[in-house]
Image (cartoon, rainbow, N blue to C red):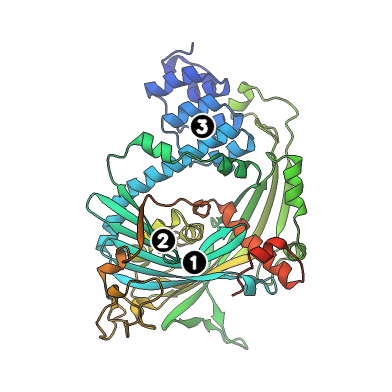
Amino acid sequence: MIPANASTRKGPEGKYPLHYLVWHNRHRELEKEVRAGQVDIEQLDPRGRTPLHLATTLGHLECARVLLAHGADVGRENRSGWTVLQEAVSTRDLELVQLVLRYRDYQRVVKRLAGIPVLLEKLRKAQDFYVEMKWEFTSWVPLVSKICPSDTYKVWKSGQNLRVDTTLLGFDHMTWQRGNRSFVFRGQDTSAVVMEIDHDRRVVYTETLALAGQDRELLLAAAQPTEEQVLSRLTAPVVTTQLDTKNISFERNKTGILGWRSEKTEMVNGYEAKVYGASNVELITRTRTEHLSEQHKGKVKGCKTPLQSFLGIAEQHGGPQNGTLITQTLSQANPTAITAEEYFNPNFELGNRDMGRPMELTTKTQKFKAKLWLCEEHPLSLCEQVAPIIDLMAVSNALFAKLRDFITLRLPPGFPVKIEIPIFHILNARITFGNLNGCDEPVPSVRGSPSSETPSPGSDSSSVSSSSSTTSCRGCEISPALFEAPRGYSVLGGQREAATRDDDDDLLQFAIQQSLLEAGSHHLGGTNQQQARHPPHVL
């Protein structure tokens, strides 16, 4: 039995008591130690792992269960940037993946609820507005930009209420799916109501998020993943894409000829913006396959279309504005078992050795130059008005999560009326803010919009403002009816959870990539039965 007093311990069991018990898979003693509450459950060992990360990597299911039950953070990354869920997948243990996935989703709900009071306060203080965010995917690869999807998110903010309309819903059977959908967030004193309005089916899915008194067991039960969800992870590569911006720098773009140069400005939707280039932005895509069977590895390698082969050539040469793509493949071997003394000794060099399943990793690194169009006189405030909305949407939308990661950097002064950032190694996303408060085009339900007499598809006609006064781009009034369930729609309790809600980066990447590949095969004369069932959206 390990002494209860940590000060009497020596060696790794004294410095890292929870890790030491996890290493030896002594889950009953681990339970007692965690209950005592005298040791930090998030302590890092010399290899940059929390006790939960260590338990998951070693495949010690019962130890992971104990740590998760006592609140160990599933969202933490280890020193190599892998999440607990990604390490669980690499073990091939279905039960372990199911357990980790369940607690990950549960903890996300809890964090989301905990952040609602702060979000409500930010929304309450911010000035009301309407704005459109146009998303366009661009690429330096010929023809790719023409077959990429695009969408315009329409955003209404009034008091503690928020509504976002979209037509790009996600993907199904590896094809982009479109529809007419609204997401409504309505803040109240002690709770918030979230609605997903499907205008095509005239159905409203509603959920009330109480700010206190949530039953832990009910939330855990609701987060239980299906076996199909778990198997889909175990039969697909683990893919993560991240922007490395630690060395990023912003410089004004120049224009001019014959030695005469001036700082560049452009008009964006009626606003004069300074153009900046962001250099030293690296997009790193890492793919792990050690958990896949030979059959599934063959499927991953063998499913190439003519465009995919072409993109492979294009990747090797890089684009006109981008650095050459560097691809590295690591097949890690563990020729000798690692002892506890070696692992917990910070001065001992493990080299390529590590515990767990030998890693099969492919890393793609490419440098990009992001662009920013910043307007210092823009009526909107990025910090006070737009950032809280992006934070809220980022919970369940991978595109907004990418945008949030970029705008949280220390940007030059001004509002980013247009942003161009990389999201995949051949794709950039260009986001443009426009039609503020209906200044450019009439918007139903926005009082002061030039003409707001005709409701848009899916909008309740009763919500149209009767005002036709001149729009002030620095403020507006929005009809409260916009945040209610439309008349004649069926209202169902409980928010629908669809596969497209999973905000893991790999789903976004596969959706974009497959959309390009399928559309490219069509244009290049390829045949595909699935393509016939789900034709690509050519925009």
Q: Which residue is mark 1?
A: 179
Q: CA distance from mark 1 to mark 3?
A: 40 Å
User: For numbered disc 2, what is the local secondary structure?
Assistant: helix
Q: CA distance from mark 2 to mark 1?
A: 21 Å
Q: Is residue 486 left or right of residue 199?
A: left
User: For numbered disc 3, what is the local secondary structure?
Assistant: helix
Q: Residue furthest top?
A: 1
Badge 2 crowding class, 10 Å Cα cut-off, few under 14, some 14 to 19, many 20 or more, is some
Q: Residue furthest bottom?
A: 258
Q: Which mark is residue 52?
A: 3
**Amino acid identity at mark 3:** Leu
> Can residue 127 be seen in this snapshot?
no
Q: Which mark is residue 390?
A: 2
In the foreground, 276 or 306: 306
Q: Is residue 537 left or right of residue 445?
A: right
In the foreground, 536 or 68: 536
Position of residue 243 measured from the top left corner of the image (x, y, whole percent): 56, 57
Q: Residue at x 77, y 71 (%)?
A: 525
Q: Quadrant of residue 351?
A: top right
Q: Quadrant of residue 156?
A: bottom left
Q: How many marks?
A: 3
**Amino acid identity at mark 2:** Ile
* Earlier-in-chain disc, 2 versus 1: 1
